Image: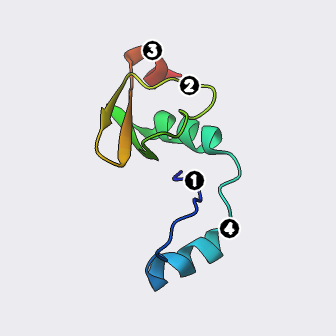
């Protein structure tokens, strides 16, 4: 769910292999919906600081660092039952 960026340094070889095996992240909103369905309390998504929120949903709150942001989606009792 972390978008591909123009980073200067390459990721570790294990992560490069994992990305090749899994392929591109076509629809992060689908993945977020599946995570919310499976979660009991919350889903936390790590995003770049200036990246937009995942389309179709707005985080309940965000924790911002110097270069990244953690968007937190709380699971309510009504969405957990669906």
Q: Nearer the viewer, mark 2 or mark 3?
A: 2
> Residue at image x 36%, y 40%?
70
* CB atoms of marks 1 and 3 within 8 Å: no
Vertical order, 37 against 6 (above or below): above
Dot 4 corresponds to which residue?
A: 23
Q: Which residue is more in the foreground, 21 or 67?
A: 67
Asked if residue 40 shows in the view, the reply is no
Q: Residue 3: give its label.
A: 1
Which SS class for mark 1? loop
Q: Nearer the viewer, mark 4 or mark 3?
A: 4
Marked residue nearer the N-terminal end (2 or 3)? 2
| Sequence-wise first label, 2 or 4 | 4
**Mark-to-mark CA distance, 4 and 3:** 33 Å
Dot 1, crowdedness within 10 Å: few (<14), some or many (≥20)?
few
Q: Nearer the viewer, mark 1 or mark 4?
A: 1
Residue positioned 50% across, 71% down in the render: 8
Q: How many other residues sit within 10 Å of disc 3, few (<14), some (14-19) or many (≥20)?
A: few
Q: Earlier in the sequence, mark 1 or mark 3?
A: 1
> According to the image, label 3 marks what residue?
78
Using the image, tell me which numbered label, if any, was put on residue 57: 2
Q: Secondary structure at mark 2?
A: loop
| Quarter of the view holding residue 76 | top left
Return the x and y of residue 80 as percentages of the image width and height.
Answer: 44, 24
Residue ID at (57%, 59%)? 5
Q: State which quarter of the image contains the C terminus.
A: top right
């Amino acid at each position: 769910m972390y978008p591909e960026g123009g980073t200067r340094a390459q990721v570790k070889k294990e992560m490069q292999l994992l990305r090749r095996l899994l392929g591109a992240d076509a629809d992060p909103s689908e993945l977020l919906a599946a995570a919310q369905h499976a979660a009991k309390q919350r889903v936390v998504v790590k995003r770049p600081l200036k990246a937009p929120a995942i389309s179709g949903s707005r985080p309940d709150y965000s924790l911002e660092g110097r270069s990244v942001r953690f968007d937190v989606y709380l699971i309510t009792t009504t969405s957990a039952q669906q």
